[in-house]
Image (tube, helix red, strand yellow):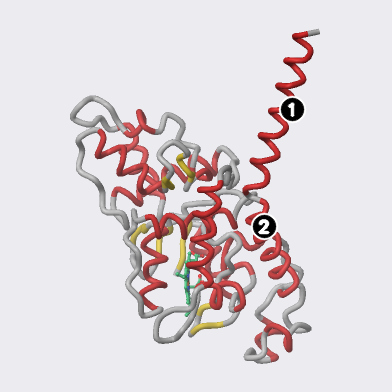
Amino acid sequence: MLSKLVKSAAVIALTVCSLNANDFNAGAEKDRLAVIKYLETKFADPEKNRNTFFPYSTDEELKNDYDKNLKHNDFAIGSYSYSKDARSQYEAIKEMPPYEDGIEKGEELYNKKFANGNSLATCFPDPTVGGTYPYFDEKKKELVSLTSAINDCLRANGEKEWNTKKGDMASFQAFIAYSTQEAGKKFDIKIESEEAKKAYENGKQYYYTQRGYLKLSCAECHVQGAGQRVRNEKLSPLTGQVTHFPVYRLKWDELGTLERRMSGCVVDQGQVPPKDESTQMKELLYFLAYMSNGMAIDGPDVRK
Ligand code: HEC
């Protein structure tokens, strides 16, 4: 009898816990689904949706350069998902991907011994974890991004920290992304406490706040503006925007991290970007990563 009571109390306690865990991400889940629905509606038929979503595009462009009936996972390749022309160029480059040396270099770095005999493999015994960053460290009450986790590992082992934008950092992240992709894993970002929820909310607020001399928010370009042309490129959508990092950009002629790419956007807004390992940057990454939840990791990748 007693053991039965104890058992059922345990079941109740468990249920309460899991209900709470679900609750913390309820708002984020609503946001994620709303953006997917918005994008699927917008790209169901750009020509037909001209007045609602594409007032500045030409008829010819809408008719010839956009695909129809895009669904959630189609957005994983960013602006190439809707632009036929850009996609064929992208697919041609992918036949001889310029980032392969980067993945190899990353694997060497993974196994290379530090002066104290440890290695990055000691800190990341499982390299297929690309879809779990940033995560909220509930003990330290702070976000950990992949970039900060890598530098934390180096610092803790008495090694010199890496440049957070390119070089070894980008190569090592290419190896992590590739290993995660090979394992067939998806983005799986968790929000399991009040503090984690707050961090998500801060990142979301950053994304939707207008700033700079143009008074633009990230969302105006990458949600409402997704699919619009800016010079010769179409704007990528928020959904799936971070599934493929690091990227080899033709403009950079090398691999670079997500922080490097986003900082470029903030500079274009006429602002000073947050430092790559700062709380503000990690909150923004947390929001972006959550919005790609459920999508396959497909990095590294190539962009113009
Ligand atoms: C004035 C419009 C504009 C604003 C505002 C803007 N971006 Fe961008 N962003 C671009 C353009 C143009 C590109 C290159 C085309 C593309 O892939 O979207 C880009 C690319 C990106 C990419 C790379 C996409 C990929 O597929 O690799 C990310 C990530 C990104 N932006 C994030 C952000 C974030 C976060 C903010 C706010 C801090 C922001 N952007 C603000 C115009 C903008």
Q: Position of residue 263 (x, y in %)?
A: 37, 67
Q: Position of residue 283 (x, y in %)?
A: 46, 56
The residues tagged by marks 1 and 2 sit, at their Cα atoms, a distance apart of 37 Å
Locate the C terminus and report the quarter of the image it occupies: bottom left
Asked where in the image residue 84 lies, by quadrant, the reply is bottom right
**What residue did someone put label 2 on?**
73
Asked if residue 25 is positioned above or below residue 87 in the image, the reply reads above
Q: Nearer the viewer, residue 266 or 204?
A: 204
Q: Nearer the viewer, residue 80 or 266?
A: 266
Q: Residue at x 55, y 49 (%)?
A: 297
Asked if residue 40 is positioned above or below residue 299 in the image, the reply reads below
Q: Residue at x 60, y 72 (%)?
A: 223
Q: Residue at x 48, y 46 (%)?
A: 133
Q: Position of residue 68 (x, y in %)?
A: 74, 72
Q: Residue at x 44, y 36 (%)?
A: 139
Asked if residue 145 is positioned above or below residue 30 in the image, the reply reads above
As shown in the figure, which amino acid type bears the numbered disc 1?
Answer: Ile
Side of 200 relative to 124 (left or right):
right
Residue 71: mark in rendering = none
Q: Nearer the viewer, residue 154 or 180?
A: 154
Q: Residue furthest right?
A: 1
As shown in the figure, which amino acid type bears the numbered disc 2?
Answer: Asn
Asked where in the image residue 228 lies, by quadrant, the reply is bottom right
Q: Position of residue 177 (x, y in %)?
A: 47, 46
Q: Secondary structure at mark 1?
A: helix
**What residue did someone put label 1 on?**
12
Q: Secondary structure at mark 2?
A: helix
Other residues around mark 2 within 10 Å, as few (<14) / some (14–19) / many (≥20): some
